[in-house]
Amino acid sequence: MRTYFFGDLHGNVDALDVCLRCLEGQKADEVYCLGDLAGWLPFGDRTFVRLRSMGFPTVAGNHDLLIAGAITDFVGQLDRMQATAYNAGLLFAEEGAIEYILALPLSIDREDFTIVHHSPFDLPASGSAPTIECFGYLDPAALRHATPLWRNYPKRLIFSGHDHIPAIYELPEGGEVKVHRPGPKKDLTLYLNDNSRYWIKAGSVGGPYRDGTPVANSVLYDSEEQTITMLRIPYDTKPLSEALSSHRFYRNLATIKKYIEILSLGHGS
């Protein structure tokens, strides 16, 4: 079985297009979206409509829930709050969009893996509503906190997005966590160890790219070959860079200014 994972689209339809073209050549049996269909960029309606029409099983991301008004943000996240408000205006005008988001599950369990936007260890208790605190980041402190729970987690594999930094975290039986990262523009294939657990952070399709590399990221899991492949898909970032630079509202956001600088590295790809 070949299973394809991608997420964190964030309104970047150019990156989504190359990701879907990549998918066509992967001969995937199943496809899952890891959430954040919109948010950050001012074109969230485009990626949302495109993804919804494809019918892939999808989990809710923090940006999706923020846009739908299901959770509220940290008070210091000024750029993100402004981007959320802008995208909410787009999606509240899109028929059925908010209802679709509110119906998305926070996690999906399959025989040997769990799919979640960030972490299965930060999900709300059964019957409780999510909060923004459910969506931290997998920094060293968070990883140390999660490791004891991870050792006893019922699924061997966890697939998630959110951090916008592609990485495979390996937890050997009785050992310390190892981290496997792809090169800046190079795919990574890892053969799985029978005695290890794996937490796969797929990276972002649409950015902002927190690892500084403007490529569309996705993951392929081959259960027969027992491999995980992190795919780094280049695309021409110049059209998006120009669209953001000329956007009278977005070009003033500090996060977007930094994003435009990173996008300049992918012009003509």
Image (spheres, grey):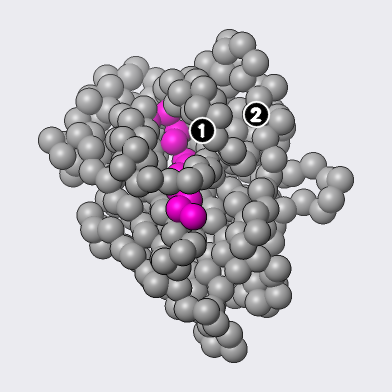
Which residue is pictured at 43% across the width and 46% down the height? Answer: 28
- Determine the CA span between mark 2 and mark 1: 9 Å
Residue 243: percent from left, percent from top? 28, 22
Residue 166: percent from left, percent from top? 40, 57
Q: Which residue is at the front of the view, 222 or 161? A: 222
Q: Name the side, left or right, on which 176 lies relative to 228.
A: right
Tell me which corner region of the image, top left, top right, bottom left or bottom right, holds residue 191.
bottom left
Tell me which corner region of the image, top left, top right, bottom left or bottom right, holds residue 227.
bottom left
Please tell me whether residue 140 is drawn above or below residue 36 in the rendered image: below
User: Which of the marked residues, 2 or 1, is nearer the chain's N terminus?
Assistant: 1
Give the residues in magenta. 1-12
Which residue is pictured at 79% across the width and 42% down the height? Answer: 129
Query: Badge 1 local density, few (<14 within 10 Å), some, or many (20+)?
Result: many
Q: Amino acid at mark 1?
A: Leu
Q: Is residue 256 visible?
A: no
Please tell me whether residue 97 is drawn above or below residue 22 in the rendered image: above
Residue 121: percent from left, percent from top? 69, 61
Which residue is pictured at 54% across the width and 35% down the height? Answer: 56
Q: Which residue is at the front of the view, 101 or 1? A: 1
Q: Is residue 151 visible?
A: yes
Identify the residue position indicated by label 2 in the image.
Answer: 101
Query: Which label belongs to residue 37?
Result: 1
Q: Name the side, left or right, on which 184 lies relative to 230.
A: left
Query: What secondary structure is marked by label 2?
Result: helix
Q: Name the side, left or right, on which 81 lies relative to 231.
A: right
Query: What secondary structure is marked by label 1?
Result: loop
Q: Amino acid at mark 2?
A: Ile
